[in-house]
Image: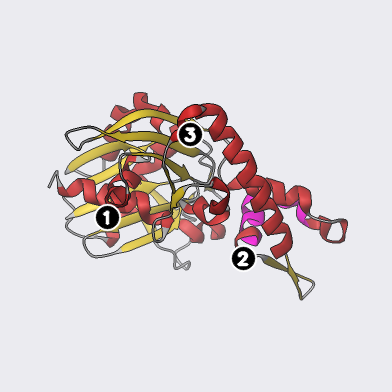
Amino acid sequence: MILGLDIGFGHTKVCSDKDAFKFSTQLAFAPDDPNMELETVNIAGNKYIIGNDTKYSTYRLEIPNVEYLIKYAPVFLKYVLNRVEGVEVVVTGLPPNCKRYVEPFIENLKTVFSGHIEVLPQGIGILYDTESRLDSEAIIIDIGYNTVDCISVEKSENGEWKKKRAITIESFGVMKAVEILRELIPSSISILKGWSASRLLECFEKGYIYLSGEKISLEQYKKDSILKYTEILMSKIDQEFKDVFRETPAVVLAGGGAYYVDDSRFGRNVIVPEKPEFSQARGYYIAGQSIN
């Protein structure tokens, strides 16, 4: 069986022969309490809680950067392998600027998985997922929780896709839109300004909050933050790619952040895959079919 595994800072997405699912990329040591009914993963004598259940532990582990994501990746993979049986091939990825981490990433994953492991640059999975809808050139924009990965691709005369340029834009993911929302919050609900980023992200995604039992809509502030975020993101990508961005006929918007940009502002052939947060994992799964 083939497993497409997209470990992001916000969520981990999984695509296999049988299923597609996601869970929060959150991690904590399991409390030593036999009365607590929590699903755990045991690695090298350590018991971990994965996903939303981490809120029940006071021993939460932060994953602030790629180094920590690689360190704890085996825990997330083992959690997935406990749910998906018979996996022989795992295809996953790292940001384009993290090529130096590929070997240690593979070695870490091998501590819990003995099958074939393939690591692709993030964004290439999205290319595999959407190439049937592309003509000859495209810029793939993968909007994640913290980062935005952009890859310029072009089809050669023999029909193969070639990577022409790849960049990772730090601190321009969905959390950028959430921070803009924080700035737009009025004084009447200023209590939100002091909330943590993860808590405010939940409010941003839902578009409302409850304060003292009263439901307060955030939809207008959310809409305004999305418009501002789209303009800032477009400006940053244009700055990085310059004429290539302006002249490329198609843009693919994927990743969980694809829900939170105004794609009409890109002014060209914009492709948003179905369930864009799963596009990377689906593409990894498709890539795995040529390996298996």
Looking at the image, which residue is at 27% across and 51% down?
132
Q: Quadrant of the N terminus?
A: bottom left
Amino acid type shown at disc 1: Leu
Left or right of 247, for residue 164 = left
Q: Please report the bounds of the magenta region as a residue range.
A: 192-203
Residue 250: x and y in percent read: 41, 44
Asked if 89 appears above or below 206 in the picture, the reply is above
Is residue 226 at all visible to an observer of this figure? yes
Tag in front: 3 or 1: 3
Amino acid type shown at disc 3: Phe
Q: Secondary structure at mark 1?
A: helix
Q: Which residue is mark 1?
A: 81
CA distance separating discs 2 and 3:
32 Å
Residue 218: x and y in percent read: 72, 63
Tag in front: 2 or 1: 2
Classified by dominant secondary structure, the portion drawn in magenta counts as helix
Q: Which residue is mark 2?
A: 206
Does residue 200 belong to the magenta stretch?
yes
CA distance separating discs 3 and 1:
40 Å
Residue 147: x and y in percent read: 52, 39
Left or right of 153, for residue 2 = left
Looking at the image, which residue is at 43% across and 58% down?
23
Mark 3 nearby-residue class (10 Å; few <14, some 14–19, many ≥20): some
Residue 131: x and y in percent read: 29, 47
Q: Which residue is mark 3?
A: 245
Please tell me which of labels 3 and 1 falls first in the chain. 1
- Asked if disc 3 and disc 1 are in contact, CB closer than 8 Å, the reply is no
Hey, which residue is sitting farthest bottom in the picture? Answer: 213
Hey, which residue is sitting farthest top in the picture? Answer: 100
